[in-house]
Amino acid sequence: MIIAGRLVSHASPCRSGASRDRVASTDGDAIRQRRGIDVRGLRSPAIRPSAAHTHGVNAYNRPNHARRRSMAMIVPEFWAEARIGEQFGRDHASGRRSLTVRRFGWSNANLADAQAMADARAREAFDRILAGASLPKRDPRVPYDAEGLPIREQIVERRGDIVITRNSYGARCLNSPDVLFADVDFDEPVSAWNKYYFLSSLAAALIAGAMARHLGVFLLSWVFATGIAIALAQARGRARHRADGGAEGRARKRIDAFVAAHPDWHLRLYRTPNGFRLLAMHRVFDPNDPAVVEFFEAIGADAYYALLCRRQHCFRARVSPKPWRIGERARSTRAGVPSNNPASMPKAGVWPIAAERMHERERWVDDYERKSAGYASCRFVEALGSRDYVMAAQAVQRLHDDLCRSDSTLPLA
């Protein structure tokens, strides 16, 4: 069964070095030819190229930073699915009476190649399961977090090896094989509730019950005392939350500590609706590089995002607003607090979707894009650390900032 979706994509190997930038950073023609991005006029007096670029060689293109050529960010143009099902007799060596296996295939060339890959993957999995291997009978139908499967989202645009996709709730995302992004969400106040609050409320209830010599008084007193104890615990938790600078202050301290320990790093800091975003400028990275793992842990990046980076062999940043934070949906919530409900995007399954559902989806996307024009996804705060950069990161930074409207004063969403 062929699942058709006419997309545009580009697959390229992840890089733990920056061998694309072997030429001097001033050689714009070579850079444009390799990346498909016009970088003329990107140089800024506030940013100086690294010493390695001045001499025409990237410092991170060394053996200890060699590329892992087997790793690649892939956003396929065509998808297909194969199904193999067989019935067996009672005396079959596997002990099975039947087996059905489904697998996806993908291609940047055509549907026939995608179908051939799906058929081959299904046959291999079928034979291995029949031989006793413990494998899932079907690939997960998810857009972005399946180990062993490429990114499965609608492609909006590509710029060289940078791919802009539309995610499951309609927002656009920038996907890069080697330019490091990380979002740090602010944490919430945690109640100080512990066993002492519980024991204190119980003791107060016992005293009130003993004085009244009535079980009902004891129970009512315990409920009342517990409510007071919970309120006090929450108030104390909020006070502790504010005492060390609050969620924003704690996040900033972790970031500043990392920069102090790694003065050779050049990080651009952005403010998002609920946290910070960081973009590394001084080099490119393989998502499985130990330095990336250390960075994520030090700044408190979301653990799930870190896992997805390793699985999908790319870094990712949302560059358009979340739908439920914009337009009428956001303004209709009580007390001016944006809704946390799922987006209103038509439920059409994982991309590519059925042709009969495309009209409804496209109508929704047009409305979303119109409303999102009045919002920014993040706002630039400042540059941290060194001022070294590689041209690959700078080109992505300019694209990211333009798509996010990070230099505007629009409300964040």
Image (cartoon, grey):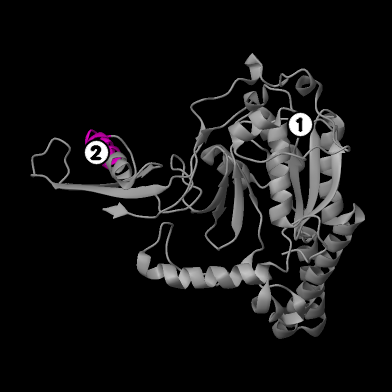
Measure how far apart labels 1 and 2 are at the Cα level. Answer: 45 Å
Q: What residue is shown with label 2? A: 123
Give the image location of residue 70, x and y in percent.
Answer: 48, 27
**Amino acid type, mark 1:** His
Task: Give the mark toward the camera: 1 or 2.
Answer: 1
Give the image location of residue 159, x and y in percent.
Answer: 59, 44
Q: How many marks?
A: 2
Q: Nearer the viewer, residue 181 or 39?
A: 39
Residue at 64% in and 64% down:
322
Highlighted magenta segment, given as a residue range: 119-132
Give the image location of residue 167, x and y in percent.
Answer: 54, 57
Q: Left or right: where does residue 350 sit relative to residue 49?
A: left
Q: Quadrant of residue 310?
A: top right
Is residue 228 shown in magenta? no
Instruction: Give the mark nearest the N terminus, 1 or 2.
Output: 2
Is 134 placed above or below 1 here? Answer: above
Secondary structure state at the residue bearing disc 2: helix
Dot 1 alpha-carbon crowd within 10 angstroms: few under 14, some 14 to 19, many 20 or more:
many
Q: Which mark is residue 282?
A: 1
Give the image location of residue 95, x and y in percent.
Answer: 16, 40
Q: Left or right: where does residue 192 sit relative to residue 30?
A: right
Quadrant placement of the C terminus: bottom right
Q: Quadrant of residue 390?
A: top right
Residue at 57% in and 39% down:
161
